[in-house]
Image: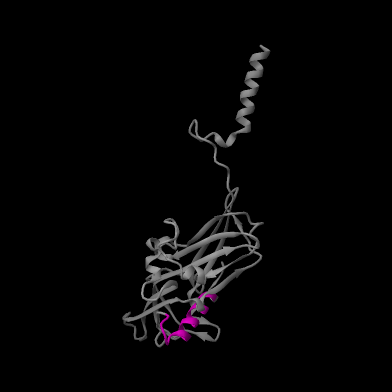
């Protein structure tokens, strides 16, 4: 009887010690639980959620429909470790997701990263990155120039009705494709309030305010007269203004 009781006690002890294996297929090893940190970006226009192809009004009285919002975030790190190598925000394709990395809020109380990609990465062979990397040309083809070697750091595309006559005519195209080493911007966030979403998961929500993008203090973008840049020669001033305003539009949500 004593032997039988000892056997039962031993089996119960094993179940209590390895509760995380209960859902595993017999014979498979148990995966360790991993702490995850997610960063997202919600586009907004002032106080409202921004939807692609929807209409918003500028301070000049234009109606604008944003059709594409993309940007690279690269080498995102805390004080002593890297959280994410590179990620591409693509509002139309992947929604508000930016990236998810392994770490804890304590290890990443602050974050610094590039809006764009650093020079050493920008001039690397885009086909040499691992197949799973967003920097590989097969994954980032639409964000890499062939004629101007390097990545497109950010894209804003839109259609604008510049005549406030009550007739919807979105025939004025806006195209901002900004790249080149000189235009890389530093994104920096301190004292981050990580929101707990699970036992080992936390979330840091950001917003991209396209109203701020157009009206960044005294540095405004008038879409009727300032509506295109491919970061070509002669477009240095508008290119810098566009990416500086884009950086200013990103903040904690």
Splitting the image into 4 quarters, where does residue 104 fall?
bottom right
Q: Identify whether 50 is placed above or below 172.
A: above
In which quadrant is the N terminus drawn? top right
Please, what is the dominant secondary structure of the magenta stretch?
helix
In the rendered image, the residue lying farthest to the top is 1
How is the model colour-coded?
one colour
Q: How many marks?
A: 0
In which quadrant is the C terminus drawn? bottom right
Left or right, 225 with reference to 86: left
Residue at image x 46%, y 81%?
239
Q: Identify whether 74 is placed above or below 62.
A: above
Give the x, y percent position of residue 92: 40, 65
Residue at image x 41%, y 84%?
223
Give the x, y percent position of residue 191: 66, 65
Q: Identify whether 73 is placed above or below 233.
A: above
Look at the image and give the residue range highlighted in magenta.
231-247
Closer to us: 32 or 227: 32
Residue at image x 51%, y 79%?
182
Left or right, 14 with reference to 159: right
> Is residue 139 one of those drawn in magenta?
no
Give the x, y percent position of residue 136: 42, 62
Closer to us: 193 or 126: 126
> Is residue 244 one of those drawn in magenta?
yes
In the rendered image, the residue lying farthest to the right is 2
Give the x, y percent position of residue 65: 38, 75
Splitting the image into 4 quarters, where does residue 226 fall?
bottom left
């Amino acid at each position: 009887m004593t032997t039988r009781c000892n056997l039962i006690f031993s089996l119960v002890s094993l179940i209590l010690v390895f509760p995380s294996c209960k859902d595993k297929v017999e014979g498979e090893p148990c995966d360790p639980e991993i702490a995850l940190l997610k960063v997202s970006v919600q586009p907004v226009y002032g106080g409202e959620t921004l939807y692609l192809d929807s209409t918003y009004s500028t301070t000049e009285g234009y109606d604008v429909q944003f059709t594409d919002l993309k940007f690279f975030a690269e080498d995102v790190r805390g004080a002593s470790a890297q959280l994410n190598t590179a990620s591409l925000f693509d509002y139309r394709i992947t929604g508000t997701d930016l990236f998810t990395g392994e770490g804890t809020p304590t290890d990443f109380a602050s974050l610094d990263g590039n809006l764009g990609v650093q020079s050493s990465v920008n001039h690397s062979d885009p086909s040499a990155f691992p197949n799973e990397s967003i920097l590989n040309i097969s994954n980032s083809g639409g964000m890499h120039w062939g004629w101007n070697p390097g990545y497109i750091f950010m894209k804003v595309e839109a259609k604008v009705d510049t005549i406030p006559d009550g007739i919807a005519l979105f025939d004025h195209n806006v195209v901002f494709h900004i790249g080149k080493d000189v235009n890389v911007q530093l994104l920096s966030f301190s004292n981050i309030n990580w929101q707990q979403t699970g036992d080992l998961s936390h979330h840091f929500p950001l917003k991209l305010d396209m109203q701020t993008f157009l009206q960044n203090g005294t540095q405004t973008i008038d879409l009727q007269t300032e509506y295109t840049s491919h970061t070509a020669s002669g477009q240095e001033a508008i290119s810098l203004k566009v990416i500086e305003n884009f950086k200013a539009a990103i903040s904690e949500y």
